[in-house]
Image (spheres, rainbow, N blue to C red):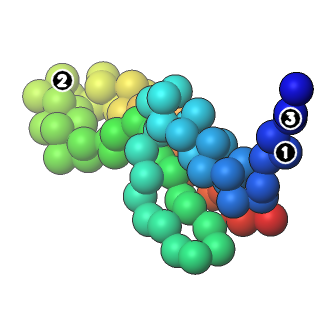
Amino acid sequence: MSTVTPTPESAYQAEIARAVTKGWRVESQTDYATTLVKGHRTNHVLHLILSVITVGVWIPVWVCMAVFAGEKHKTIRRA
């Protein structure tokens, strides 16, 4: 029985594939690294409008969305 030893290149591609299956998307890729993104940007115009309509009551929600939600970035580097 033969065993296949993964090469650094195949391990790099496998890690990217695992991340993509978990909901990450490729933002940019170079010869040495890949940047992945998950989530969406906060829509600040919408939150501004909601803050004006609710006379500022919406501002704590907006601050929480800006701090805790939004896009998450991670970089996978080639070995």
Residue at 24% across / 42% down in the picture? Answer: 43
State the separation of the CA atoms marked 2 and 1: 60 Å
Q: Which residue lies furthest to the bottom in this view?
A: 31
Location of residue 40 by image quarter: top left
Q: Are marks 2 and 1 in contact (CB under 8 Å)?
A: no
Identify which amino acid the numbered label 2 is placed on.
Thr
Q: Which residue lies furthest to the front in this view?
A: 1
Q: Name the residue under label 2.
A: 54
Identify which amino acid the numbered label 3 is placed on.
Thr
The image quadrant where one finds the N terminus is top right
Identify which amino acid the numbered label 1 is placed on.
Thr
Q: Residues within 10 Å of mark 3 (few under 14, many from 20)?
A: few
Residue 38 spot, x, y in % from top left: 46, 39
Residue 48 spot, x, y in % from top left: 21, 42
Q: SS class of the residue under badge 1?
A: loop
Q: Are marks 3 and 1 in contact (CB under 8 Å)?
A: yes
Of tags 2 and 1, which is closer to the observer? 1
Q: Can residue 63 be seen in this view?
A: no
Disc sitting over residue 3 in the figure: 3
Location of residue 53 by image quarter: top left
Q: How crowded is mark 1: few (under 14 residues within 10 Å), some or many (20 or more)?
A: few
Of tags 3 and 1, which is closer to the observer? 3
State the separation of the CA atoms marked 3 and 1: 6 Å
Residue 72 spot, x, y in % from top left: 53, 44
State the separation of the CA atoms marked 2 and 3: 64 Å
Seen from the viewer's position, the closer of residues 74 and 58 is 74
Q: Mark 1 points at which residue?
A: 5
The image quadrant where one finds the C terminus is bottom right
Q: SS class of the residue under badge 2?
A: loop
